[in-house]
Amino acid sequence: MAKWSNHPFFIQAGKGCAEAAQAEGDTCLLLGPPDSSHFRQQNEVMEQALKMGLDGLALSVTNSAWLAEHALKEASQTLLITFDSDLGPHERHLRKGYVGLDNLAFGKELGMLAQHFRPQGGKLCILSGNPEDTNHQERIEGIRQQLRGQAEKGVAGRQLRGEKGWSELARCPLYRAANQNDALIKLTTLVASSNQIDVIISTGSWLIHQAELYRQQFGPLLARQEEKAVRPTIIIATPEPGAAQRALLDDGLVQAYLSMESQEIGRQSYRMMKRLAQGKPVPEKVLVDTHLHLSNPLQGTRVDR
């Protein structure tokens, strides 16, 4: 059950699940709202799915508390796991296991990239999805923990305020990057009106779904910022980047991607659901690898890890 079934990440995860299921004579369906990510729409699709007699359901969580009070009340007869975005701590007992990233650690990796490009610190803006999305909130918290230097008590959810040289713009995080157009409008408006942004971190891949659209709409602004010596460093969390997205690295329009193994998340989700359907034990969490892709715009080179 995707947050948004037409999102590139969920398409790839669905492909991995379907291929793994087909190899075992089973079927894996990609379900979810088709046009955007919203917990009410996801809840509606989930209510329909729970009437289909499924042997298992893998859910990427939008709004944990709200779903627990609605569709998940009817999920007791379905073997529920989560993937990509887990249930919150208070609702986690409703699922059998989780497949995906350690999103807090993933956020810390994004923070390390910011430190790599700006070791002296700087002004940060985070672009993210819905503020209810557990995975994106965990990534944001990981970014802040890494840049603060430690996990301080009483600061969860608080913007950086100069710790270790890092601070966040008052208007950030920029939430509700529901699609590429929304994400580009939000970011272009902010960058065009400010010469104070040193690093932009996107906790998802909305900006680059269509690489050419990113190039056309954001590239000229970056060029003008370059002339003024105020151009920000851009770091994006993404599924496996394709050739068009990698070209953005080569051309210096993005400085770094941190990618996740989308199809492997789908494959492992199928395997966990299959074991549960067979009455076999499963681990509480199955985590997949991440991969770093760096660009050096001065030399036009790229380093992939």
Image (cartoon, rainbow, N blue to C red):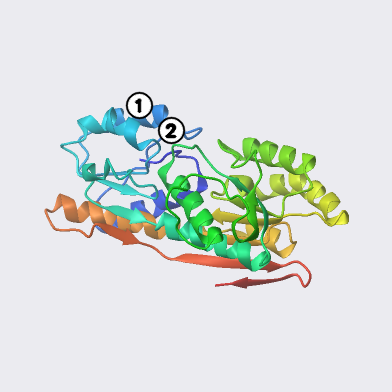
Asked whether residue 25 appears in the rendered view, the answer is: no
Residue contact at pointers 2 and 1, CB within 8 angstroms? yes
What is the crowding at mark 1: few (fewer than 14 residues within 10 Å), some, or many (at least 20)? Answer: some
The numbered mark, 2 or 1, whose residue comes first in the sequence reads 2
**Quadrant placement of the C terminus:** bottom right
Indicate the quadrant where residue 113 lies: bottom right
Asked whether residue 133 appears in the rendered view, the answer is: yes
Q: Position of residue 260 (x, y in %)?
A: 47, 59
Q: Position of residue 75 (x, y in %)?
A: 21, 35
What is the crowding at mark 2: few (fewer than 14 residues within 10 Å), some, or many (at least 20)? Answer: many
Helix or strand or loop: what does disc 1 sit on?
helix
Relative to 106, residue 69 above or below: above
Q: Which residue is mark 1?
A: 44
Mark 1 belongs to which amino acid?
Glu
Relative to 221, residue 152 above or below: below
In this view of the protein, which residue sits in the foreground, 84 or 132?
A: 132
Q: Residue at x 66, y 67 (%)?
A: 119
**Disc sitting over residue 263 in the figure:** none
Q: Which residue is mark 2?
A: 33
Horizontal placement of 90 versus 10: left or right?
left
Q: Position of residue 207 (x, y in %)?
A: 63, 46
